[in-house]
Image (cartoon, rainbow, N blue to C red):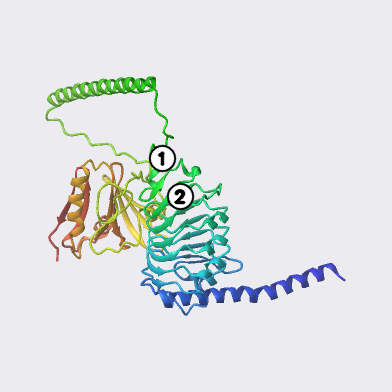
Amino acid sequence: MNSPLFFTTTVIFSLVFSLPTSFSDLATDRAALLALRSVVGGRALLWNLSEPTPCSWSGITCSSNPPIVTELRLPGMGLSGAIPMNTVGNLTHLRILSLRFNSLSGPLPSDISSLSELRNLYLQENAFSGPIPASLSVLTNVVRLDLANNNFSGSIPSSLNNLTRLSTLYLQNNNLTGPIPDLNSSSLVLLNVSNNQLTGPIPSRFSRMPTSAFQGNSLCGGPLLSCDGTGSGGGKKLSGGAIAGIVIGSVLGFLLIVVILVLLCRKKWSKEVGSKGKVAMKKGDPEMPRKKSIESGDRDSSSSGFPAVAVTKGKGGGNGGGEGKNLVFFGESVRTFDLEDLLRASAEVLGKGTFGTAYKVVLEVGTVLAVKRLKDVGVPEKEFREKIEVVGKMDHENLVALRAYYYNRNENLLVFDYLPVGSLSSLLHEIDANAYFTAATMIIAVPTNIKIIRWTTTMWG
């Protein structure tokens, strides 16, 4: 037989028999997605059902060859109700499943065990209930599993030991009971089981993890108090020499701090005296313009992600205030994203000003925002919050609504809805000399305050 002819024939037969399989898989995925949509709904699932393939639908990502659904990302889409069988479980080639920040409830469907290729499972901030299904233990490719802030009950299944690639396990803020199983996976580096009803000793391999990962339970052992109540240090009493050394060291440290404070006060006093002398000598001189500083996070072109923000660890968040790791939202703004989404999103520099840099930020779900990163604010947290809340409560057709803000000592962010028509500056510079305009409203971030300035000019006919 002619070898080239045999090879060509083999390739043709392979293509002919593989194409129907690919189309069949994609049709199965489409049917599963439509079934999920019909049950849990969602205000943002505005999929174009006339399209034969789901690969162009919002939140859906497909592989190129063959075309099959590999990612389902629907965070904060207003989904509600229980996930039925033969929906998500039929998307057998999924690698990422993200349904966080919704109102999904009920137990997880048992056919979730069919997702053998799943790597990341994000189900936090829902109302799922019932036990953590043992079927999750067959998902041996899972790297990140986040079930936090739900209503899961029962014990933590020891079968999670089968997840040999698991590096992150978040189970905080549920109703889990019983002991923590000895999860001996060598790849597990991040664990949080706080605010449950767990009891008993903490496995020794977790003794180096932060105490916050275990608080809000009835647990004992490192890093918490040891189970005999003597502390995680094992109950050994310090010798007299050790106690004396600690006391002497503390006294010397205190004296050193006092000396440093005295030196700093003297240095500050010397600078104030010198500056007063210079002001007296240069009285009447015009103020020199300040040089613009370039923040390390700013760029002149678009980037793959929002510039790094120095996040202060803490609770905060919600609609409360204070320093923290979350955004503070205003009014009836729906919380469909958090600070983590903002930092992970793609960003483009819109412009730089004296008081900071403006970015166009596109979240993973397609939402477009405008983010103002302030610099040199220089006001206390309480004053900043009071001023910014005045801005957030303002409602006017010529005023861009402030959706949220973030505050800590190092970073200050303002989040607005993005207006694609351009900035006020570009509109003012492009306007014709014979045109007229009225009552334009600007929000200006002053380093020492946050104010609203309404600027009005008269009209030409």
The residue under label 1 is which amino acid type?
Asp
Question: Looking at this view, is 399 or 219 the one in front?
Answer: 219
Q: Residue at x 38, y 19 (%)?
A: 241
Q: Which mark is residue 228?
A: 1
Density class for disc 1 (Cα within 10 Å; few <14, some 14-19, many ≥20) is few
Count numbered badges in the picture: 2
Q: Is residue 199 above or below residue 8?
A: above
Residue 194 visible (yes or no): yes
Nearer to the camera, 305 or 422: 305
Label 2: which secondary element: strand
Farthest residue, direction front: 228
Location of residue 281 (image quadrant): top left
Instruction: Please state the horizontal and vertical placement of residue 398, each as a whole percent of the image.
Output: 20, 63
Mark 1 residue element: loop
Q: Which mark is residue 191?
A: 2
Q: Are marks 2 and 1 in contact (CB under 8 Å)?
A: no
